[in-house]
């Protein structure tokens, strides 16, 4: 048994249980589809609620699209933040869109290989059963992809002769509403013999199964689109998918035994009814949640506007309030900066007074560059090359002046620094 069959095994056991209870393989498939619908109801409900809530965010999504037009990265970040804030998983609906196809593939394998997958018959026993079925059918077995279905028919019709081969053998009844669901429907209706009702009625019934399956698949998608505003908003892009899935269902059901078509029909009916019921159930709840969300956003916007107006009023009066959330460390740093700025102004004023008392001016010396008073040197003379005869005397005078200037600045700086330290300690 491969890993695929190990995964399928519990579902095959459920199908066997329904077959034993109903005595009909077609009914067992319908009950199996119903059970899966019930099992996945909580997950589908959660997905449906999430999808309906996402639809309510469409206006906000359009606003974000306009706001971040041309910047897809910021738009995606804003959308992700919005989904996180609202507790929505945009991928939650994708899984349930593909899950039915997964189970259809599993059911197909169970239907195609009833002896090995459904009944878990080993190779040795399968060879004996095949040999005996070939003898009883007069060598009429096709040996194709659905050979095991033909063998099961022979086994079911002559079960007593196979009972001693394996205790795992179970007779399967493929007759459902007068149809043999082990047969493959034909789309070539013109080749049907309409002279005998016993021939054309079952053939026509089988012909209708793929049509009903495709029709129900299309109706299910239309109902889902109409009842889901998120899908309705993208109806143009969904149009191709709405046509592709029913056409795929039509083609598959005309190429496989009608058993799969019956399961597909039942699955579509149950899922459509479930989707309709969930939409009706969650409509009022989602509307109430959306109204609450709009009220919450309106309250937040009103509060922000109130704070903005109050800030503008206080700023106009020069009474801007300090942010209560600012940390103590930041407040101390701000006070320190204010103190240093004030003392720097006082320091500059005091320096000017002391320089004036020493007979020094506050004029910018020739050696100053920017705020650096002696960037070109303390004995710098600007025209020393133009008037070299006076350069030596001017250089000596500049050096003496710089020494007096430096001493005055140092005295002022030391006094001001002491005052700054005293202020900060207080």
Image (spheres, rainbow, N blue to C red):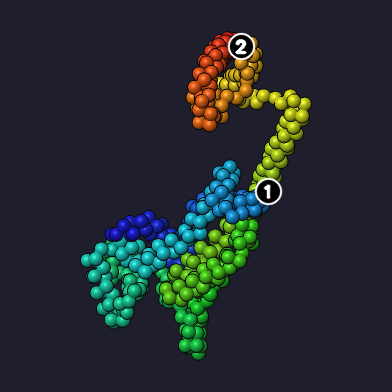
Residue with the most extreme bottom position: 195
Answer yes or no: is residue 213 visible: no
The quarter of the picture where residue 222 lies is bottom right
Q: Earlier in the sequence, mark 2 or mark 1?
A: 1
Which residue is at 35% across, 62% downward?
Answer: 118
Residue 312, visible in the rendered structure: yes
Q: Which residue is mark 2?
A: 358
What residue is drawn where x is 50% and y is 78%? 207
Q: How would you rate the neighbour count of disc 1 (Cα within 10 Å): few for under 14, some for 14-19, many for 20 or more?
A: some
Percent across and percent down for residue 54 are 60, 51
* Secondary structure beneath label 1: helix
Q: Determine the image quadrant of residue 321.
A: top right
SS under mark 2: loop
In the current view of this chain or complex, which residue is farthest to the front?
Answer: 389
70 or 273: nearer the viewer: 70
The circle on residue 163 is: none
- Residue 287, label in figure: 1
């Amino acid at each position: 048994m491969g890993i695929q069959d190990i995964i399928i095994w519990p579902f095959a056991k459920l199908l066997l249980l329904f077959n034993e209870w109903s005595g009909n393989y077609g009914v067992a498939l319908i009950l199996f589809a119903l059970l899966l619908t019930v099992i996945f109801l909580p997950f589908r409900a959660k997905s449906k609620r999430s999808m309906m809530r996402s639809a309510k965010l469409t206006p906000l999504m359009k606003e974000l699209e306009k706001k971040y037009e041309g910047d897809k990265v910021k738009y995606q970040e804003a959308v992700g933040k919005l989904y996180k804030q609202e507790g929505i998983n945009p991928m939650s609906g994708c899984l349930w869109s593909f899950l039915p196809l997964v189970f259809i593939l599993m059911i197909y394998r169970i239907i195609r290989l009833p002896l090995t997958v459904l009944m878990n018959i080993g190779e040795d026993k399968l060879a004996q059963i095949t040999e005996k079925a070939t003898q009883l059918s007069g060598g009429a077995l096709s040996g194709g992809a659905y050979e095991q279905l033909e063998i099961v028919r022979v086994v079911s019709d002559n079960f007593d002769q196979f009972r001693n081969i394996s205790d795992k053998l179970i007779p399967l009844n493929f007759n459902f509403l007068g149809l043999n669901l082990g047969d493959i429907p034909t789309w070539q209706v013109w080749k049907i013999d309409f002279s005998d009702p016993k021939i054309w009625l079952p053939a026509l019934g089988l012909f209708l199964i793929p049509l009903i399956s495709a029709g129900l698949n299309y109706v299910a998608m239309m109902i889902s689109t109409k009842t889901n505003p998120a899908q309705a908003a993208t109806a143009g892009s969904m149009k191709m998918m709405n046509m592709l899935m029913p056409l795929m269902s039509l083609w598959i059901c005309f190429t496989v035994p009608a058993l799969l078509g019956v399961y597909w029909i039942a699955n579509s009916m149950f899922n459509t009814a479930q989707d309709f019921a969930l939409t009706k159930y969650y409509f009022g709840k989602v509307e109430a949640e959306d109204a609450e969300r709009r009220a919450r956003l309106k309250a937040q916007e009103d509060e922000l506007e109130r704070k903005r107006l109050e800030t503008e009023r206080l700023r106009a009066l020069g009474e801007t309030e300090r942010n209560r959330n600012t940390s103590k460390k930041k407040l101390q740093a701000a006070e320190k900066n204010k103190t240093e700025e004030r003392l720097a102004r006082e320091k500059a004023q005091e320096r000017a007074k002391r320089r004036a008392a020493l007979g020094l001016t506050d004029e910018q010396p020739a050696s100053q560059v920017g705020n650096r008073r002696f960037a070109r040197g303390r004995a710098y003379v600007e025209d020393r090359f133009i008037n070299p005869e006076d350069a030596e005397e001017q250089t000596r005078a500049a050096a003496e002046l710089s020494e007096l200037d430096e001493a005055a600045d140092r005295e002022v700086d030391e006094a001001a620094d002491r005052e700054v330290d005293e202020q900060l300690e207080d």
